[in-house]
Amino acid sequence: MASCRAWNIRVLVAVVCGLLTGIILGLGIWRIVIRIQRGISATSSSTPTEFCRNGGTWENGRCVCTEEWKGLRCTIANFCEKSTYMGFTFARIPVGRYGASLQTCGKGTPNAGNPMAVRLCNLSPYGEIELQNVTIGNCNENLETLEEQVKDVTAPLNNISSEVQILTSDANKLTAENISSATRVVGQIFNTSRNASPEAKKIAIVTVSQLLDASGDAFQEAAATANNDALTTLIEQMETYSLSLGNESVVEPNIAIQSANFSSKDAVGPLNVRFSVQKGASSSLLSGSTFIHTNVDGLNPDGQTELQVLLNMTKSNSKACGFVVYQNDKLFQSKTFTAKSNFSQKIISSKTDENEQDQSASVDMVFSPRYNQREFQLYSYACVYWNLSTRDWDTYGCQKHKGTDGFLRCHCNHTTNFAVLMTFKKDYQYPESLDVFSNVGCALSITGLALTIVFQIVTRKVRKTSVTWVLVNLCISMLIFNLLFVFGIENSNKNKTSDGDIHDIDFKNNDVPQTDTINIPNPTCTAIAALLHYFLLVTFTWSALSAAQLYFLLIRTMKPLPRHFILFISLIGWGVPAIVVAITVGVIYSQNGKNPQWELDYRQETICWLAIPEPDGVIKSPLLWSFIVPVTIILISNVVIFITISIKVLWKNNQNLTSTKKVSSMRKIVSTLSVAVVFGITWILAYLMLVNDDSIRIIFSYIFCLFNTTQGLQIFFLHTVRTKIFQTEASKVLTLLSSIGGKKSLSSVTRLRLRIRMYNFLRSLPTLHEHFRLLETSPSTEDITLSESDKAKQSI
């Protein structure tokens, strides 16, 4: 019998070693395959990641450079180097922009903290990059004092315009009050009744361009100020100014203005004016990128056209027209449309010199929006204009047309500030279905958990111990979680993906959208995420209760347990996670309930699980406070209790031990694993998946998947198969099956030998010590008394 038991132990060790070797070989082969696939994908890519240099990004077939670089690969310098002039030091300045001096006004001046001077980096008539002279500001002036000065009709507008331009040169420091004051001053400079010089107005254009670099939040706060019409006044003044440039143009990084004058003798047939804006190497507007053509037949966009406007003046008696292009929509603060992305939202203004009552011109427009086509799909768009009376976008008189060239086309029967409000759908990379590894592991766990639950319930009268209730609840919560994970973790929206073709857009609907990014709602996925959140928290809570119970029974030897103990732990195990999930969903909904996409603040779109926070939103993340923090606390407490029980109970030297040393060590190892599985110690591997090294993270991911997808199977083997009741009943069933399975020709002696071998094999499996009856119970056990617990503690 002893040799048989030793043989079985050797077989068990060999099987375990074989499994570990197979896992390691499988991981190695899988890693090699991944490297081969990465190599193929890298060589097959048309453009390597390193193609665009100096911060440039590869978008839609070309490099989009920063302002400081240009060229095919963003390798040509487009800036003025650091310089010192007249005692002022200037950092690197991109071409076309003013750079602020590093020297700032002193603390005791009204203009404290603002730069003392500015300097322009520009192109010479020969195309060479050069620095202009330094313009020095007055530290005793600020935007508030200039706002008071500009009200005087005799105020020197040239000086005021220069001072405002200097004070707004550092857009990062501009506040809502600064923006309001600056726009009121600039609006007066553009006021035709003030007769400001052309030079003062051109400097004011620079100020407007600098203001458009300020944060969107500052503009929103400025627009929300009560009775603040400074932005609206500035928009109107810019429209009027666009008619006064003759045939000239003024182009700054964030704004471009161009006019066209013509007489009746120029009109041969239909008098149409076409204004075009070409794409540049960067997102900024560049000198020479805007063009006006008169007496044209229609629109004629090409691959380099970003937007184009056709002003139809057939019935008009106008002598001049003007166009204004805004790089972004910060001056146009809408109450209905919210832009959440940084996509280009250019605004185009067209105006004629006709009286408002005689307006007869119409416009046709084409837009080629800039956005990352690898991450987003164009979902829809609306042709709108800025209603100056309501100070919001409106669609009256505008409609969209279907084209065949990939451009967004609009037509409006009037002239004003136009825009195309685009709505994008993020092109989520939905994961593939669960692989065989996960499916097999979860299927085995589901089977093991179901059998464990049935076994624990059926034999509850024979094993009279409260541990049964805790183990059953743990298995039930884990079983439900596994079922939800297998059948509900995938988002059904993955089957609704489209290619973002412009022909799929609804051209009959021209309503103003609420936001520029949308997601298809999926309440079912949100419910699945909440249930997964709940049942996984329940699983960890019951593992913590199991750890606490074993601690009090084995270490503190508290017998009997307090009254209503089962009811108390049941309320905690099922109630506390429900409160956590309810509070989490309630807080998120109360904060974002008005947003139809509030679900994505709670769950992911790619899978039905808690949302992964952005780098700057980790502190406010529901994943952190409603899952990671409580689970971390539970795991830490479980590890402490596990170490305590292992040292003081499981691995404590037992002088009365009569079995061999080898079997004793095996029992201790298996007993330790039994406790570790119930306590969920293997979930600590999830933290090892956070390492930055891809190779190490992938290995730990598979180890984590191996241990945790099969956790239910481990519980079945360690807490069901190893019990004497199960072994006895399984021996009887196997014996019965062998007797009725067509082996009647065997002699009675042979059948007896088979029974003995099967019984000895099952009996040879390592079991817990007889006195450790909280994890393994005997066929007929009375309630453990205090003295019995003491004896068990001393003997283990």
Image (cartoon, rainbow, N blue to C red):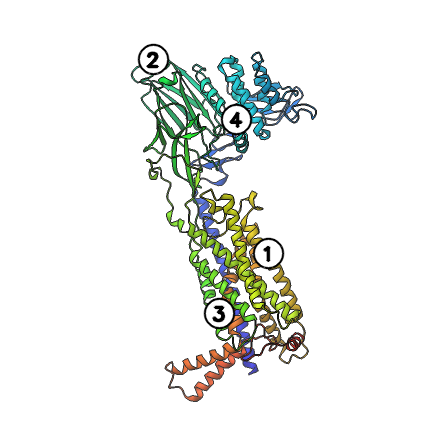
* Disc 2 target residue: 266
State left or right for residue 446 relative to residue 358.
right
**CB under 8 Å between callouts 4 and 2?**
no
Q: CA distance from mark 4 to mark 2?
A: 43 Å
Assess disc 1: are there few (<14), some (14-19) or many (≥20) residues with their C-alpha within 10 Å of its C-alpha.
Answer: some
Q: Return the disc, 4 or 2, that comes first in the chain's sequence.
A: 4
Q: Residue at x 55, y 60 (%)?
A: 540
Q: Amino acid at mark 3?
A: Ile
Among the 4 quarters of the image, the one containing residue 616: top right
Task: Report the mark closest to the observer, 3 or 1.
Answer: 3
Q: Disc count in the image?
A: 4
Q: Which residue is mark 4?
A: 228
Up/down of 689 relative to 228, above or below: below
For the question of whether residue 374 can be seen, the reply is no
Q: Nearer the viewer, mark 2 or mark 1?
A: 1
* Residue holding disc 3: 453
- Going from N to C along the chain, the mark reached first, 2 or 1, is 2
Q: Which mark is residue 632?
A: 1
Residue type at mark 2: give it: Asp
Query: Where is residue 686, by image quadrant?
Result: bottom right
* Residue sitting nearer the eye, 102 or 453: 453
Task: Residue 458: give its label.
Answer: none
Whether tag 2 and tag 1 are in contact, CB under 8 A, the answer is no
| Residue kind at label 1, given as amino acid type | Thr
Q: Nearer the viewer, mark 3 or mark 2?
A: 3
